[in-house]
Amino acid sequence: MPSPNKILFVQVYAGGGISSEFLYRKPSDYRTYLLKTYPQMKKWARKDMFDEIRKWPDDVAVQGSIDDLNVAGHFLSENIKTPSKVLDSPIIPEILISELRKDSYTHVGFSIISIDYSNFVKCARAVKDFDSSIITLAGGPGAMFDQTKDYVDHVCVGRGVPFLRKLFNEKIDDPYKLKIMSNQYHLKYLNLETSTVLHRMVTKIGCPYKCDFCVTHNMYDGEYTGELFTPQYIHDELINFRDKIGENKLSIYFEEPTSVVSLKWWYDLFDLFKDDDGDFAFYVYCVTSILEKLDLEKISNSAARFHLVNFGIESFNKNYSKNTNVNMKSLIRKFSDHGIFTNPNYIIGFDFDSKESVMEDIKRLVDLGATMNTVLHLHPHPMTSVWKELESQNRLLDVPIEFHFIHGFQSFKHPNFKPGFEDMLPLLNKIYQYIQTETGGKIVSYIQLMKNYPKLFKKDIKSLISMGKLVYPKWKKFFNPSELQDKNYLSKIGL
């Protein structure tokens, strides 16, 4: 009689390759990491190139980090009846085989982040070498590459839950269940540290937008589910979870790439929290055309609140329908005035970009006054319009798959940027240095916004001001700010 099914969910993800922290803190350490992780990188990662980039001392800015969490694995595990286990930490073959020895697993499900594709191949082969009867499955952005099918038994393109339910002969149309999973985000400066526990959940699958650079639409085979749960269900689950852990202040992170689509759904959710005495801080991803229509007064008298809104500007020079006719500066001010953190995402490296034009765009980005700014360079993801265009023009470099996703590595032929690290890496470093000098860094921006709502953020303000005062002399010495930049830093932390 065959053994009952049991699936192990793992994620293949090398975070260091996309970490901006490396770029502006310790470029030489970044090179060491790259050479160790990707031996073929030696051709591109010349020592003199990395040595020319100015190293940041540890004491000039705070460091952010987040604990490992396999979100996809936990969500899938919750929504199938077949026994399963989820590993949160990214795996390597040795860790994977060690776990397989502990139990009678019949299946292994890989969530593949493209940055670690070669490691996925090694892990997939290691499973078959250990026990060829174990059935292997792959999903995630890395599964979009054609060759993935050569390394696993099944490739999932589309929604993972119905895929697995069909595989295990379960009822495909059973309702979804909400899974709340937790990890911590840390802000650290030398020996001082403040941490926030983030409770994460998935409430939608896919994305209704079709941005040319984004893999999400293709990854789910063009499908967008809309809201999987009613506002009442979300409310009740959060209340039960709050009571279970005994905490009245929760930070809730919505994992889907577009969290706010139906404003009515959100208005109804906020209304359900109106008579509660807790604090439910929501972290969401949105598009500006919907955020612009959001009536903040409608949700102001609720125990639930938006704490952070992430949205993609993408580029000032490219028309994305989700941003049409939106006044970004006014939108950001609107949220800041209501104590809501904003994080616009900006992409550099489109064909029209040059070193000079990018810096002008970054100045414009910082001038919007957001709490923080995320700047990335263009990574060509598989099956996207960007990838297909570059491929058809024979512009993709002949490099291992993961090289296309390494931070600071120009992986396609560009009219204004040389291949590899030579142009893009120093430019990103320059961008981070400008943002840090102009804004004073995350601590200062956080303090500035929190002061609008001192009762809500009283404890956080005190802790961050202590950090800000310690950072200031080091920040000033290293970045050599202008008189106005120096004055702005001091005024924001109350000195």
Image (cartoon, rainbow, N blue to C red):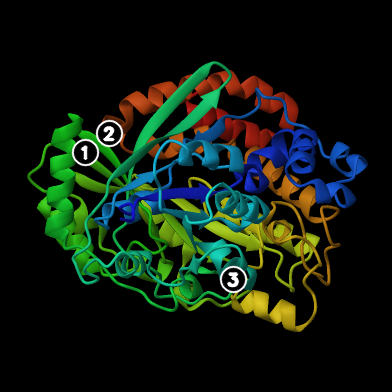
**Residue that numbered label 1 is attached to:** 279
Q: From the image, which quarter does the N terminus lie in?
A: bottom left
Question: Sequence-wise, which precedes: disc 1 or disc 3?
Answer: 3
Q: Amino acid at mark 1?
A: Asp
Question: Sequence-wise, which precedes: disc 2 or disc 1?
Answer: 1
User: Residue 456: which disc?
Assistant: 2
Q: Amino acid at mark 3?
A: Phe
Q: Nearer the viewer, residue 391 or 124?
A: 124
Looking at the rendered image, the disc whose residue lies closer to the viewer, 2 or 1, is 1
Taking the spot 64% from the left edge, 42% from the top edge, the residue there is 16
Taking the spot 73% from the left edge, 77% from the top edge, the residue there is 390
Point out residue 287 in the picture as x, y percentages from the top left corner: 42, 66
Is residue 304 toward the left or the right of residue 461 in the image? left
User: How far apart are the alpha carbons under marks 2 and 1?
Assistant: 9 Å
Q: Do the numbered discs 1 and 3 sit on residues whose CB atoms are within 8 Å?
A: no
User: How far apart are the alpha carbons under marks 1 and 3?
Assistant: 36 Å
Is residue 374 toward the left or the right of residue 274 in the image? right
| Residue 382 placement: quadrant | bottom right
Point out residue 81 in the picture as x, y percentages from the top left corner: 24, 56
Would residue 8 be visible to someone looking at this image? yes
> Mark 2: which secondary structure?
helix
